[in-house]
Amino acid sequence: MTSIDVVYLAGGEGIRAGLGYPKQFYRLGGKPILVHGLETLRKIDMIGDILIPCADEGYIYKICKDFNIQGIRPVCAGATRQTSVYNGITETLTPFVIIMEAVRPFITEELIRKVIETDGEAVTPVKKNISTPLSIIEVGDQIFVHPLSRGSVGEVQMPQKFNNKLLLRAHRRALSNNRIDYSDDVALLHSEFGKHARYVDGIEENIKVTSPLDLVVAEAIYNSLHGVKGERE
């Protein structure tokens, strides 16, 4: 495959994390969370420009300069995740595009390559057979609808790969109908055009840092991966 541009979502305010500042700037192992994913992306030769929807372009430039991250282009974040993606993909030039979240610090080079190299107009990682001892159910308006088998549900992860022109058309159709709150682009593409994504196996440690508990889990994963002993040890 020729080069592939990336839209790297870093415009979230991080209110749920309770930090008082965006969670993508939380220091994990001495680096802002968003730097971990950028460094992994830059290990892959076929990655082209990295478009970063964000609220403060100057701060993004500073961080990337501090950590020697090359080939980035900040763009204005949108009011929602979906509009941030749109602002990013309108600036990309490659036939395919990768959508990735800045708050997934443990993304691996292997998973990114697997997504890129899998054929399809839309490809996403999915963590199958969610490992929980709890029962999973579908609920309605204050009613129990029916139980779900843990083996039949999966967790959608990032990064996701798309045919660039197809994704742009889907976004424009959604925006023209004032649909601006899709949670991810696989859902958007399916809802707007009925397109199904192919999936590859996701990985356990590819968490999305959103809440205070996620920060604790992220610290534990980082310490485990880097052989750092916790305070209790």
Image (spheres, rainbow, N blue to C red):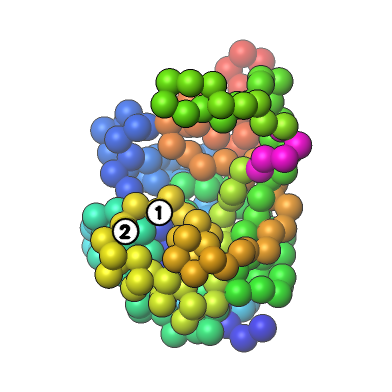
Q: Give the magenta part as a residue range.
A: 150-154
Q: Residue at x 72, y 32 (%)?
A: 149
- Dominant SS in magenta: helix
Residue that carries the numbered disc 1 in the rendered image = 182
| Residue 72 image point, x, y percent | 40, 71
From the image, tell me which residue sits under label 2.
Answer: 179
Q: Quadrant of residue 125?
A: bottom right
Q: Is residue 199 magenta?
A: no
Q: Secondary structure at mark 1?
A: loop
- Left or right placement of residue 26 versus residue 125 in this view: left
Q: How many marks?
A: 2
Placement of 124 over or under 20, stated as above or below: below
Three-letter residue code for mark 1: Tyr
Estimate how packed mark 1 is, as few (under 14), some (14 to 19) or many (20 or more) residues with alpha carbons within 10 Å. Answer: some
Specify the amino acid type for callout 2: Arg
In the displayed structure, 139 sits above or below 13; it is: above
Q: Position of residue 86 (x, y in %)?
A: 35, 68
- Say if 233 sits above or below 130 in the image: above
Viewer-nearest of labels 2 and 1? 2
